Image: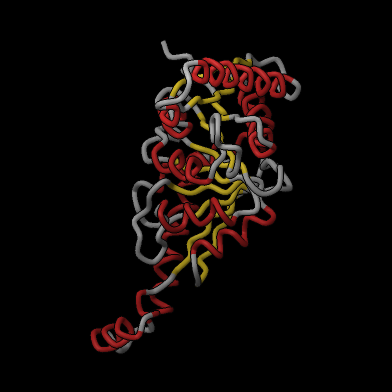
Amino acid sequence: MSVFEGRVVVGYDGSAGSGEAVDWAATEASRRSLPLVVLCAYDVSSLVGASPGLPTAGWDEAARLAADGADRARKLSHGIEVTAEDAIGTAAGVLIDASANAELVVVGTRGLGPVAGVLMGSVAFAVAAHAACPAVIVRGEQVAPGPDRPVVIGVDDSVRCQAALRFAAAVADDVDAPLTVLCASRPAAAETWAAAYWYAAAPEVNPEAAALNAAQQVVDAAVALVRQEFPAVQVDGHAVAGSPTDRLAMESRNAGLLVVGARGRGGFSGLHLGSVSRGLIHEAFCPVAVVPAGRS
């Protein structure tokens, strides 16, 4: 049995940003009544040709950091098991491996790098893109969803998005938070050549209005699913024009958690990690949850 089975796993490297991630993970693990693992990775790939004593010293440092992170987590946890783990490998690699068995993986967006590098931006992107379970990137304000802080989800018309929608609705249900469903439309006719093609093929249709109408249909379907499966959740939805990244980032100012799918269909909503999700890891004002298809 994996040491990460059914647990919340958080990356820690001793930096202030990683401490914020540990704090968030400890609170969330306590809310879910799940054990918490504080994980520090030790990357030996940069030590080729180094003196014999360095690998041992680095390993000891990784173990110490993991223990320090676990001590910090225990101050915020309430009756849950908190353990420290250190592992050889890149920070992204060990966290992605852990996600195969974990319930949730938590990282931050900036960090130290030399020993674990858990919170370097590239690590956050890699974990968000490849984690097998939902991954939360802790950035922005230290906030959590609740009655005064909605869960916000960006949706598109892909089947993959449904896992993210159910994850967002389940969180909102658990913490009595309202759920806001947002779909942003960015019509292909925004470029001159595309506009010319659109008006030639369907001159009677306004491309901006058509895109917004399509986005509204996506929102209506998402809201209907939530109301059917999570009847206690207060949910509303909005179709808006503009960049999905910009509109979701704006919505995140008052949110407790922003949720997106790991990959979307593209097109008018473009919820793909390389664009919207990646942008939100940079720009959101609250923690961002990236949910892979099939996991909720």
Numbered-mark total? 0
Pick out the residue farthest to the right: 75
| Lateral position of residue 231 relative to residue 273, left or right | right
- The residue located at (42%, 62%) in the rendering is 269
Q: Is residue 293 visible?
A: yes
Q: Position of residue 177 (x, y in %)?
A: 66, 43
Q: Nearer the viewer, residue 235 or 175?
A: 175
Q: Nearer the viewer, residue 44 or 221?
A: 44
- The residue located at (66%, 23%) in the rendering is 69
Q: How is the image coloured?
A: secondary structure
Q: Is residue 229 visible?
A: no
Q: Nearer the viewer, residue 123 or 254?
A: 123
Q: Quadrant of the C terminus?
A: top left
- The residue located at (40%, 48%) in the rendering is 161
Q: Quadrant of the N terminus?
A: top left
Q: Position of residue 163 (x, y in %)?
A: 42, 41
Pick out the residue farthest to the left: 201
- The residue located at (41%, 29%) in the rendering is 45
Q: Position of residue 88 (x, y in %)?
A: 45, 21
| Lateral position of residue 57 relative to residue 290, left or right | right
Q: In this rendering, is residue 58 above or below 288?
A: above
Q: Position of residue 72 (x, y in %)?
A: 72, 23
